[in-house]
Image (cartoon, rainbow, N blue to C red):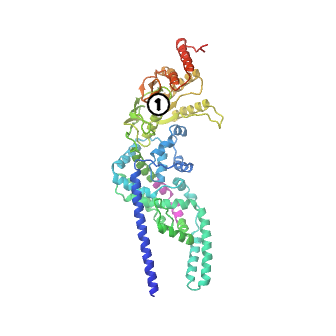
């Protein structure tokens, strides 16, 4: 009797210690998480993105793509992947996938953009509410190399679990354990056999439920945090919180006894969950629970997707609020429908740490001239990216920005397509042709960007065809911003295009660029001088100068013989 009492006391003490350790671990986890969230606010995620991660991140955007989303050519021209990585401060997979889809779609509904700004500004200005929201989202976490939305779309086709089979196996094990009290010799052996069968059966079934094994613990955390999010007192988010709460109520059966399924929290370990792994393996309680979860998930698939999108939206707004902290200069854009125009001050490229800000305003198409490396390509990418950011993240890297609503498309970073045998010129004219099609289909004015139009052909045909192409692209309310070395185009198109240029300063031993935008066409003739500065042979430079002077005097080229 005394021995039994000692065993009971030891058991109670162990249970108390385990509970205390669990609470201690949870407290420490939350403290580490809060410190991490504070430390990383205003900083992008520095992880490396591999192909599987990109596949997961982009899946939602592919499923919800709209006709006028930014196409792959424009995305690649503008280094969309790099910009997304810099602005991706999300805490959940839903937010990450939603943010990417948002960046690919230029919103033309001013009310939607105003709602984004309302929430982003609130989160910037109210740290206490922001911190609570971040903590709730961080408890959901991010999936590893798989798309949450893709798994949600697969719920309807998930295989069913024969729950009664697993219940019978669990009961058989219990009978064997109880039988040990009657006939230990026989029942211990029978119990070992049943355990072996249960373990083999467990892993055989579990391998068929890989998607659910990963998805449902994640969904459980999402539903739990839906409740927590709904309970945070944030009147500005009340509509979103109410929807999350309504959806969460439909998953009570889904969440009941959810501890039977491994949670796998990302921020730390759990002793009880480790112990439960052995219970799950022998009794299949998690498989039985997953069978119930599948049934509920099929019934409530649309509510799961709605909760996914609400959490994704809120997390995206947090991400943008955090990303704004990266820049010393930024502003919320002033957008309007109507006649095409852009007005900006101190606008610079969002990927540059110390970008040079330029004032830029126009209601016409624009030609940019200047030497190589003077800043033309960087500037047109800066204008393009900020136009996209204005209508997606409602944030512009400038001190002031006003414009009409646009659809953005570009033709810049082109190269020979070796796989198809197409020359650079063929690739280029096909890329520009797609701009014509987009212009015809655009529901709002198109803002298109071209870097060195038709560089892949001879001078005479290039200027003739380029002038016609650029004139066509500037028709109606559409605007085109093009960089060129062909100063002739600035004269041919001066009725249709405003002229701006970048310039350089050449000294005896150096070339200096200020990257500042100037009105008018480039009038410098430093290309040959640059050859001399960087060390080309003197005889070569002098011969080039003579040929240039001869052409300017006679209008024809001479071989100087």
Q: Where is residue 509 drawn, in percent x and y? A: 47, 25
Residue at the spot 40% in from the left edge and 52% down from the top edge: 39
Q: Is residue 501 magenta?
A: no
Viewer-closest of 103 and 277: 277
Say which residue label 1 marks: 375
**Where is the C terminus found, in terms of image quarters?**
top right
Residue interval drawn in magenta: 292-308
Q: Where is residue 544 drawn, in percent x and y? A: 55, 18
Q: Secondary structure at mark 1?
A: loop
From this viewpoint, is residue 225 visible?
yes
Would you call the spot at circle 1 few (<14 residues within 10 Å), some (14-19), or many (20 or more)?
A: many
Q: Is residue 104 above or below residue 169?
A: above
Quarter of the figure with residue 23: bottom left
Viewer-closest of 384 and 443: 384
Residue at the spot 53% in from the left edge and 71% down from the top edge: 279
For the stretch drawn in magenta, the main secondary structure is: helix
């Amino acid at each position: 009797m005394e021995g039994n009492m000692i065993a009971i006391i030891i058991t109670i003490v162990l249970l108390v210690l385990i509970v205390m350790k669990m609470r201690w671990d949870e407290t420490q986890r939350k403290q580490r998480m809060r410190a991490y969230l504070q430390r990383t606010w205003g900083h992008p995620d520095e992880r490396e993105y591999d192909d599987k991660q990109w596949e997961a991140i982009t899946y939602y955007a592919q499923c919800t793509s709209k006709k006028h989303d930014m196409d792959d050519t424009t995305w690649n021209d503008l280094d969309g992947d790099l910009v997304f990585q810099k602005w991706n401060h999300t805490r959940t997979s839903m937010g990450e996938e939603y943010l990417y889809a948002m960046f690919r779609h230029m919103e033309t509904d001013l009310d939607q953009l105003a709602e984004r700004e309302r929430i982003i500004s609130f989160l910037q200005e109210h740290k206490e509410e922001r911190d609570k929201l971040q903590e709730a989202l961080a408890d959901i976490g991010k999936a590893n190399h798989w798309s949450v939305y893709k798994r949600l779309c697969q719920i309807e086709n998930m295989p069913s679990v024969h729950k009664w089979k697993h219940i019978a196996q669990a009961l058989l094990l219990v009978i064997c354990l109880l039988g040990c009290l009657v006939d230990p010799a026989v029942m211990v052996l029978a119990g070992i056999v049943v355990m072996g069968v249960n373990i083999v059966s467990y892993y055989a079934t579990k391998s068929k439920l890989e998607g659910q094994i990963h998805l449902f613990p994640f969904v459980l955390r999402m539903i739990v945090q839906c409740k927590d999010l709904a309970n945070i007192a944030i009147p500005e988010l009340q509509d979103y919180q109410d929807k999350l709460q309504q959806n969460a109520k439909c998953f009570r059966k889904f969440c009941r006894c959810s501890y039977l399924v491994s949670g796998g929290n990302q921020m730390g370990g759990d002793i009880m969950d480790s112990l439960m792994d052995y219970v799950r393996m022998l009794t299949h309680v998690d498989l039985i629970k997953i069978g119930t979860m599948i049934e509920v998930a099929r019934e409530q698939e649309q509510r799961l997707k709605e909760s996914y999108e609400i959490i994704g939206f809120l997390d995206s707004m947090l991400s943008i609020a955090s990303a704004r902290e990266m820049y010393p200069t930024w502003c919320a854009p002033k957008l309007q429908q109507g006649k095409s125009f852009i007005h900006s001050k101190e606008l610079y490229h969002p990927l540059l740490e110390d970008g040079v800000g330029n004032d830029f305003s126009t209601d016409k198409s624009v030609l940019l001239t200047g030497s190589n490396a003077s800043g033309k390509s960087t500037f047109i990418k800066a204008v393009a990216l900020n136009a996209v950011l204005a209508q997606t993240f409602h944030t512009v890297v400038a001190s002031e920005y006003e414009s009409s609503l646009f659809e953005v498309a570009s033709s810049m970073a082109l190269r020979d397509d070796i796989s198809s045998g197409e020359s650079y010129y063929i690739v280029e004219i096909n890329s520009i042709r797609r701009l014509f099609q987009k212009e015809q289909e655009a529901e709002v004015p198109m803002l298109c960007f071209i870097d060195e139009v038709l560089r892949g052909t001879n001078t005479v045909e290039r200027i003739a065809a380029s002038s016609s192409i650029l004139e066509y692209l500037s028709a109606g309310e559409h605007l085109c911003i093009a960089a060129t070395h062909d100063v002739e185009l600035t004269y041919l198109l001066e009725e249709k295009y405003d002229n701006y240029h970048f310039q350089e300063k050449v000294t005896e031993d150096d070339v200096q660029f200020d990257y500042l935008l100037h009105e008018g066409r480039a009038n410098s003739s430093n290309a040959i001088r640059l050859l001399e500065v960087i060390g080309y042979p003197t005889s070569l430079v002098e011969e080039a100068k003579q040929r240039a002077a001869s052409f300017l005097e006679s209008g024809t080229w001479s071989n100087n013989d």
